[in-house]
Image (tube, rainbow, N blue to C red):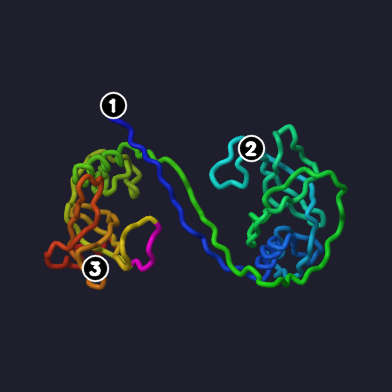
Amino acid sequence: MPDVLSAPLVVEFPFTRSLGPVQSAFLTGLRERTVLGVRTGDGRVLVPPVEYDPVTAEELRELTEVATTGTVTTWAWNPAPRRDQPLATPFAWVLVRLDGADTALLHVLDAPGPEAVNTGMRVRIRWAPQRTGAITDIACFEPYESEPTAGSTPHSGEFADPVTGIVTAARLDYTYTPGRAQSAYLNALAEQRTVGERCPSCHKVYVPPRGACPTCGVATAEQVEVGPRGTVTTYCIVNIKAKNLDIEVPYVYAHIALDGADLALHGRIGGIPYDQVRMGLRVEPVWTEGARHPDHYRPTGEPDADYDAYKELL
């Protein structure tokens, strides 16, 4: 039985967004140890605040300050915190309805164990020592014996040096294990070959193979070696340098229809100025020593392919 391939993969990117007046006031308020909500037309106070009423879609702008104490409405224990979670020790995920609010805020509770957590328990905010205008300015919640307080106080939402935008690092860590078809494809690439699979019904050759025809829905098993040369069908010019990718911008990323394939795969185009890449350009793979896949594709010097030869693969 062949070895099962697997590899750790990380998808990571910075998510950047600008803030409107409501979210700007909320996050700036956290920096100043102030929790703001927004009042709806029927008098409810929503924390965290939103710009539009989730029930009526009415635009909301009436900000109001709520307390830093509240009540746990529900919770779940996390015995093994993951990287970059708010606390490094076991904690409880909690929904906390702050005094003066009608909705609950999701955050974490610092508690010695699940036996110390219960629905209805009273808690308060523990502020982070250094605050920048983010939800992490609330370091966590902690148990706090107090009586609930009612009501909230109108607030202008005005602060000095307001926060107008945030950058959040989005990241997904997982282990990828290819199936039979893609394992064969990856093993062939290690031998500097490209293989696809032919559908027994429509007879199209798919690269990379998926183990089934996406059109007919039937299993595929017949392996077909394609390429190595191919045709650029479409492309884009990349002007933003990616993190941990040692390629100077601008460069071209293209869909390439390998000879004998009925599905275009993607690859980087090199060996030619980026502004000379074009649809129909004939290319071939360039391998580096020890690599398991082509480093890039370069022009072959052949005449450009006729549009009718690849128009169905756009």
Q: Point out the frontmost of discs 1 and 2.
A: 2
- Return the mark for residue 224: none
Identify the residue at horizontal 52%, vertical 64% (top origin): 16
> Which residue in the structure is indicated by mark 3?
279
Q: Amino acid at mark 2?
A: Pro
In the image, 200 versus 40, the foreground residue is 40
Element on which disc 2 rests: loop
Element on which disc 3 rests: loop
> Which residue in the structure is indicated by mark 1?
1
Q: Amino acid at mark 1?
A: Met
Q: Is residue 20 above or below residue 267?
A: below
- Mark 2, other Cα within 10 Å: few <14 / some 14–19 / many ≥20: some
Query: Do the numbered discs 1 and 2 sit on residues whose CB atoms are within 8 Å?
Result: no
Identify the residue at horizontal 67%, vertical 54% (top origin): 129
- Mark 3, other Cα within 10 Å: few <14 / some 14–19 / many ≥20: some
> Which residue in the structure is indicated by mark 2?
90
Q: Quadrant of the N terminus?
A: top left
Q: Amino acid at mark 3?
A: Met
- Mark 1, other Cα within 10 Å: few <14 / some 14–19 / many ≥20: few
Query: Which segment is the magenta one?
Result: 238-243
Query: Do the numbered discs 2 and 3 sit on residues whose CB atoms are within 8 Å?
Result: no
Disc 2 to disc 3, how far (Cα)?
A: 55 Å
